């Protein structure tokens, strides 16, 4: 393993464990390379210095409650954004099944027409939704 890859791996180790085979290659490289050992020592000094001087901020008690409430609002917003499309596809599916049941001899025509109508109406629904979003901004 070349020195550049060893140093990249040493930096990656700061974020968490790396693949065992890669770590074994780094471990085999370090005893033979003084420059990479110095780089590793410098990284350890930087990490130790940062750990001494950087402390996680103290969070107020209500922080978790506000965070949970915000996440719940965002989850509801995602559902609100997807709900019209889900209802659209479900209703198109139900209408297609009902039409095929009523007109079984023309099932292929019904399914083809339903697919076309579904695509066109979904395009119109998406366009209207985007226009409303843009008007709200």
Image (spheres, helix red, strand yellow):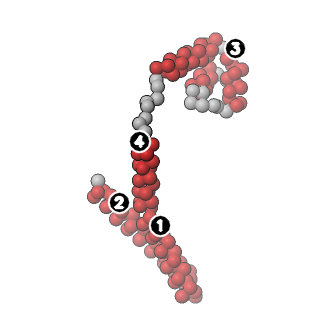
Helix, strand or loop for disc 2: helix
Per the image, the residue denoted by label 3 is 32
Image marks 3 and 1: residues in contact by CB distance under 8 Å: no
Find residue 45 and report its image quarter: top right
Give the class, few, some or many, for how many residues have Cα within 10 Å of label 1's Cα (few <14, many ≥20): few
- In the image, residue 78 above or below residue 53: below
Q: Position of residue 15 (x, y in %)?
A: 56, 30
Q: CA distance from mark 4 to mark 2?
A: 35 Å
Q: Nearer the viewer, mark 3 or mark 4?
A: 4
Q: Position of residue 99 (x, y in %)?
A: 52, 83
> Does residue 96 appear anywhere in the picture?
yes
Residue at image point 69% right, 21% down: 27
Q: CA distance from mark 2 to mark 3?
A: 61 Å
Helix, strand or loop for disc 4: loop
Helix, strand or loop for disc 1: helix
Image marks 4 and 2: residues in contact by CB distance under 8 Å: no
Per the image, the residue denoted by label 2 is 130
Per the image, the residue denoted by label 4 is 62
């Amino acid at each position: 393993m070349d020195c550049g890859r060893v140093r990249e791996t040493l930096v990656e180790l700061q974020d968490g464990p790396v693949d065992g085979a890669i770590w074994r290659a780094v471990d085999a490289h370090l005893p033979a390379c003084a420059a990479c050992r110095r780089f590793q020592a410098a990284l350890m000094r930087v990490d130790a210095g940062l750990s001494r001087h950087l402390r996680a901020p103290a969070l107020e008690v209500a922080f978790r409650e506000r965070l949970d409430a915000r996440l719940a609002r965002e989850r509801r917003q995602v559902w609100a954004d997807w709900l019209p499309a889900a209802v659209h596809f479900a209703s198109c599916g139900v209408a297609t099944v009902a039409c095929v049941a009523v007109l079984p001899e023309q099932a292929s025509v019904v399914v083809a027409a339903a697919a076309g109508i579904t695509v066109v109406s979904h395009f119109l629904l998406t366009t209207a939704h985007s226009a409303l979003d843009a008007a709200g901004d």
